[in-house]
Amino acid sequence: MSILRPFAGLLAGLLLTACAASPEAQGPEAQNPGAQDPGAAAQSGGASDRGVKAVEAYFAYEGLPAGWRLDSVTADDDNVLVIVGLSDRLWAYERALPGRAKPAFFSAICPALRHPVWEFIGSQKDIVIEARGRPLSSFHVSCREHAPTGA
């Protein structure tokens, strides 16, 4: 894995480009050039589907740190919601963190603000990381607010 780490960004970028170029990722207007309303795909979820696929591709190539688990990626009008699970050890660590440190802990898996994945989800959307796993333990963080700014 460490050998591929320098190429992970390039691989993710290539995959994101391929996802955007595929007809099913582009929505109905790409499959039917004669569609009457080119904006209908974005309204019906085409843009959301591209955002979900882009975020899934990001996590597939960047991976998650040990003890993290990607449970699901979904989209609504405002966000791409990434639900993660944590190992028992990480839940215990998270519970011991002071409240002000929790956003940094969870945003560590966010894509940097200059990463190409943001182009696929749209400038008005956010990636929200939500940790679930225990009945009383749940936390969410906005990647737009807390992600690193670098590439």
Image (tube, rainbow, N blue to C red):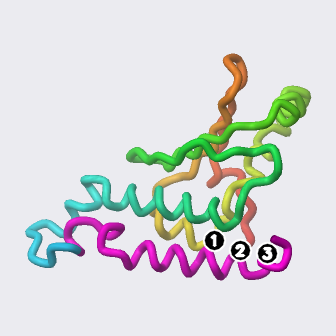
> Measured from the top left, where is residue 136 in percent x and y?
70, 17
In the picture, residue 135 is in which quadrant?
Answer: top right
* Type of secondary structure dominating the magenta stretch: helix
Give the vertical position of 64 relative to 11 (above or below). above
Residue occupying the far top of the picture = 136
> How far, Cα to Cα, is label 3 from label 2?
14 Å
> How far, Cα to Cα, is label 2 from label 1?
5 Å
Q: Circles 2 and 1: CB distance less than 8 Å?
A: yes
> How far, Cα to Cα, is label 1 from label 3?
15 Å
The residue beneath circle 3 is 5
Is residue 123 something that shows in the picture? Answer: no
The residue beneath circle 1 is 115
Give the quadrant of the N terminus. bottom right
Mark number, residue 151: 2
Local secondary structure at mark 2: loop
* Magenta-colored span: 1-30
Closer to us: 30 or 110 = 30
Of badges 3 and 2, nearer the viewer stands: 3
